[in-house]
Image (cartoon, rainbow, N blue to C red):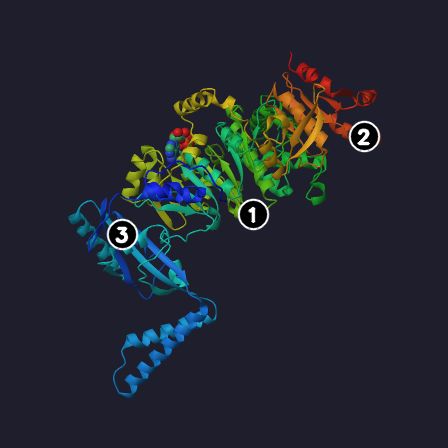
Amino acid sequence: MAFPIKLPGLPFLKGKEKKKLTGTYEDYESKLIGYLTSPPTIVKHPNEIQADKYHRCIAAINYPRLVEAGWLTRLIEMNLDFDLSIHIAPYSIESTIKMLETELKKQKTDLFGLKTEGKIIPQSLIQKHEDTKALLEAIQSGTEKMFSMALYIDAKSYDLKELDKITAKIRGQMNSIMVTPKITAYQMYKALKSILPIGHDELKITREITSSAASSCFPFAITSLEPHATGILIGFNKRNSIPIIIDPFELSNPNMLVLGTSGGGKSYCIKLMLMREFMESVDINIIDPQAEYTDLIKTFNGKTIKIAPGSNVVINPMDLMGQTLDEKKLSLLAFFRVLMGELKESQRAILDDAIDATYEEIGITTDPRTWSKRPPTLEDLYKQVLPLTRSDKDVIYKPALEIANRMKTYVHGPLRFLNQQTKIDLDNRMISFDIRDIPDVGKGTLMFLLLEYVYNMMKKSKKRKMLVIDEAWMVLSAGEEGEYILRLVKTCRKFNLSLTMITQDVEDVLTSRAGRAVMANTATKLLLKQDTTVIDEITERFHLNEAETRQLRIAGTGDALLIAGALRVPIEIKASPEEHKLITTKPDELLDMVRKAKGPGVEREMAPELDIKKAVQEKTAFTNEQIKTLMDIGFNEVRVSDLEGTSKLYMIKNETEDTDEHFVVQNLARNEIKKYTDKALIHHTKMPDITFESSDGKIVAVEIVADISLKRNIEAIEEKINILRKYDDYFFIVGDPKLVKYESFGEILTRTQVPAKIKSYFEQ
Ligand SMILES: Nc1ncnc2c1ncn2[C@@H]1O[C@H](COP(=O)(O)OP(=O)(O)O)[C@@H](O)[C@H]1O
Ligand SMILES: [Mg+2]
């Protein structure tokens, strides 16, 4: 877009030129950039050019016949001051074929000439002829294309003697990879311009190469790993600062494991990776025992599901979660292994029978048609175990008592909220499960349940997704046997799920069966700073060499050893400042951010920010231009009478199936509830429109009814009421005061009555 602007004077323009300065912004910008980036003087010499530093250019005039992927890496990895430019331009197929045919004819004539003269034909000539023939064939069949390539290097130094040394080293290295170097004497100025990152080759010292040779010039290739086009930045190679870009989903399996001492940066690096994967449209789920992902989730408009005693989110451990009954039994035994620490043979036998009996009693059998029945709860299982505690046989009552005692917490004790049917909504691309407030005894079992649940939900789609388990040792230490975990880690690649485990308890990973199963099925491993107590074991297990062991012992924040497939490389994990702000947990830095955010009141005077993420906003808050922008991205305008009875214009983006008015009222009511609690949810499904938790822990449902549907669809409403009755309390919101007469349905409020009603739930 070019638009005339009033331009400030540029210091480098004089007289006439200054007058001409009514051009476009682009003109101005390109002049300004030229001015800011040019050196003040340039002195040309035959063999170098002096612009601040001395520059000496070297061109490649010949290449080896065969090259392998990443063959330029050795050049680039030299730790010297130089720039390298490669110009690659395509040849048209016709002219390539013509050229090759002419070349073939010439070679044939040469060969024929030598033959008739009775001379020995040199092997190189035969080779060349064969190569040309093969190339022509490849081009005609479309497997190869031709390119012209030029490679220039600009060696730099403030000191001429130093420059000589650098030049010699570069030439040596080029020779060693069979590239013939040539200093571009008397052409230094042209050469320097050809090396600048402006894509302009003035030297034109080119050679023809094939597409496969051109592709192997990609300088960031790592010889031991195929570069991935869809990868994310993992970190930077510590030896040469080359960015390491990997797509875990392209490796033999997409799983990841991060091992390191506490505070070593484990969570930090996974937060970075999940943000970057999220942008690549990977769905993210996080099991977060320390509630440290919440801010990150907020930034991406994700959803934090808080699970705690008293919360209305429940996973029933007895729920089949879409598994077969046999699979469920296996997972239940694994669940009890986490719960009991270990399962003795006698305990296992009792559980086996009790589990069978529990499902049987409720009518769930091996027949798949019975699996959709309402599952039993832990209490049902508990009731099967309880009678056995009164047995007079040692082998029965002892293990039964141990099981019953442990289960008590889940049936009558602090974790009894799990003794209900599953209630959870995974309706977001980025979800974290905050389980910080679960008592420590229950954390492991809950993580296990979440793992099982999310895994089974994620099984349903082939979309790329990541399940992060922070502090995974709580699950991995699930006893000696690890069949269940083993099955999870082995099968998740089938439906594109990357299981990402973070743990500081190296011991468990290295020794427990579950841990070893995870290791063996995890292609990407990140080793961060390790405790001295485990370093020997790590060294042995990962076959580290001395330098690698040393690195892990003294590693600073962000230092890691990356093992990905066949690749092993020390890397530095770095975040951009914006990313860092989102993920750091250092108290000082967080305080600093709060202070800065509160800063001087500049913001109040600015136009309101355009928050395109909020689906309902008052129109008067925006400038005309902003309204236009909102309209462009699918917002529309609607007039609705609000909770104070004032008719107002709103800009909304209603992507639900409900009417716009319904959508606005739903949002207004939710905002009203949010004044008192964060525990409020909007639903666009069969569930009530809003659910929230009152100050005394009641779960309240709110249903917004369009006036018409209340009159005409009595049946639909009655069906809804059956759902609403399951909540501790519920009420309707209507627009027309006359409708209050349908009070037999329950409490019916007009909009203006809503604020007082909501307040009443928080007044105790
Ligand atoms: N690569 C890194 N670059 C910058 N700071 C980092 C890096 N890794 C960790 N940190 C800092 O260290 C803190 C602790 O790291 P964290 O990942 O929470 O440790 P843990 O290994 O216990 O999960 C982070 O909040 C961050 O401030
Ligand atoms: Mg952590």
**Which residue carries the number 3 mark?**
154
Q: Residue at x 82, y 21 (%)?
A: 738
Residue 102 in sight: yes
Q: Position of residue 73 (x, y in %)?
A: 32, 53
Q: Secondary structure at mark 3?
A: strand
Q: Position of residue 346 (x, y in %)?
A: 55, 34
Q: Residue at x 48, y 38 (%)?
A: 275
Q: Nearer the viewer, mark 3 or mark 1?
A: 3
Pick whichever of labels 2 and 1 is earlier in the sequence.
1
Hey, what amino acid is under mark 1?
Answer: Phe
Tags 2 and 3 in contact by the CB under 8 Å rule? Answer: no
Residue 152: quarter of image: bottom left
**Which residue carries the number 2 mark?**
708
- Which is more toward the observer, 211 or 549? 211
Image quadrant of ligand 1 equals: top left
Q: Position of residue 507 (x, y in %)?
A: 40, 35
Q: Position of residue 755 (x, y in %)?
A: 68, 17
- Which is more toward the observer, 15 or 482? 15
Hey, what amino acid is under mark 3?
Answer: Asp
Q: Does 728 sit above or below residue 554?
A: above
Structural distance between the alpha carbons of marks 3 and 1: 48 Å
Q: Residue at x 64, y 43 (%)?
A: 324
Pick whichever of labels 2 and 3 is earlier in the sequence.
3
Structural distance between the alpha carbons of marks 2 and 1: 45 Å
Q: Residues within 10 Å of mark 2 (few under 14, many from 20)?
A: few
In the visual, does 553 lie left or right of 214? left
Q: Nearer the viewer, mark 2 or mark 3?
A: 3
Q: Secondary structure at mark 2?
A: helix
**Which residue carries the number 1 mark?**
495
Residue 260 in sight: no
Q: Secondary structure at mark 1?
A: helix
